[in-house]
Amino acid sequence: MSANVVGRRIQVLSFSLLVLFACGGDPHATHPSQPVVLAAGGAGGAQVDMAAGGIGPHDPPPPVAEPCNAWPTLCEMRYDEVSFPAAHAAMASSAVFWDFPAQHVGIREQLDDSIRALMLEVHADGGKLKLCAESCTEGRTALSTELASVRAFLDANPREVVTLIIDNRVPASDVASAFAQADLERALFSDEASSQWPTLREMIDADARLVVFLYDAEGAPAGYRPFWKVAGATTATASVPRDLDCEIVTGEAPSSLILVNLFLGLESETTAGAGGQSSAPGLRFLPDEKLADSVNHDPFMSQVLAHCAAYHGKKANFVAVDFFDTSDVIAATQRLDGLIP
């Protein structure tokens, strides 16, 4: 090698070292000095600063905790300590042409978009079980169809716990038969009542991830729980925001579970009460998108839930809304659970 070539290589090496030191670099460094994000988002987010004595460049990252209902923090919370966003009249979506829709999208889409409690109404119509909203002439869908949607969601999402709150206008045994035919009983949380509910982790580990409540559970097999014996609900007949309050008007008070209804309805005459909670015979409350928009957003929604938590000494377990996809109910329940500020 000629002296000229050696000289040029020495000049290049010297210039490279000069640039490195001028920029604050360390020619002997073997790992970056900036934090490495191993998991982002949710309660399981973590940062490891390797320059501050964290893992080395060749060490495997620490395990990230598996979530329960999308959040690792929820795994150690009992079922009755969690706030579940709920779709009121979940079956009555405009996607299937209901006269008075309460939601914009169907049940599978609701579950995919983080709704974890579905309020349903089962009727006998033409000799078959249908999901209707007071009258099957105003809209209906086969119960078997929607139960298949729930089963598909649970199969695709093995770390999610889902609740169905069913206003059954048919015998409980008929509802149970439909669940058996839909192959949903294998996911049913059927433990007998005890002094306390299990954690979400325990339910997931046991693959008992579907909780089913019935308004009328007489004659029901294990796993179909009488809602009004373990839960209390606020008014379902509010027509203006000031009518929404925290008083339990249906079910047990005090109770282990609380349903806060955060929806409004347009008054309409009918021959029967709506869902067993009508304030007067011959009066029903129809969902209305403009009314829903007046109560579906923060800070109003979170303020109501915080007030109810103080009023009852415990937070709401189910927060039911109309048109959930244009509401803040997902964030509001996450805030109740302490997952977000």
Image (spheres, rainbow, N blue to C red):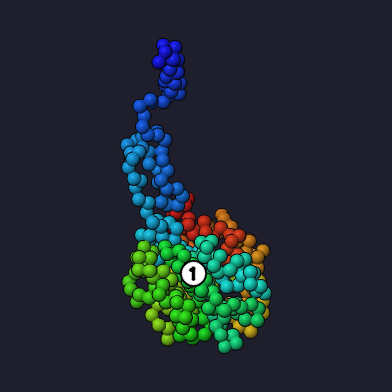
Question: What's the residue at 40%, 33% (across, down)?
Answer: 33
Q: Secondary structure at mark 1?
A: helix
Residue 203 occupies which quadrant of the picture? bottom left
Q: Is residue 313 visible?
A: no
Residue beneath the point at 41% across and 25% down: 25
Residue 73 position, x and y percent, is 39, 56
Residue placed furthest toward the front = 1
- Image quarter where the N terminus lies is top left
Closer to us: 192 or 257: 192
- The residue closer to the viewer here, 160 or 76, is 160
Residue 9 placement: quadrant = top left
Q: Position of residue 174 (x, y in %)?
A: 48, 85
Image quarter of residue 253: bottom left
Q: Does residue 89 sit above or below 10 in this rendering?
A: below
Judge by depth and name the residue closer to the eye, 326 or 18: 18
Q: Residues within 10 Å of mark 1 (few under 14, many from 20)?
A: few
Q: Is residue 39 visible?
A: yes
- Find residue 113 and report its horizontal and vertical position in percent: 54, 61
Q: In the figure, is residue 251 to the left or right of 57? A: right
- Circle 1 sits on which residue? 152
- Residue at 38 percent of width and 56 percent of height: 66
Amino acid type of disc 1? Ala
Q: Nearer the viewer, residue 307 or 10?
A: 10
- Please tell me whether residue 115 is drawn above or below residue 9 in the rendered image: below
Query: In the image, 60: left or right of 315?
Result: left
Residue at the location (59% across, 77% down)?
Answer: 141
Q: Is residue 226 above or below residue 304?
A: below
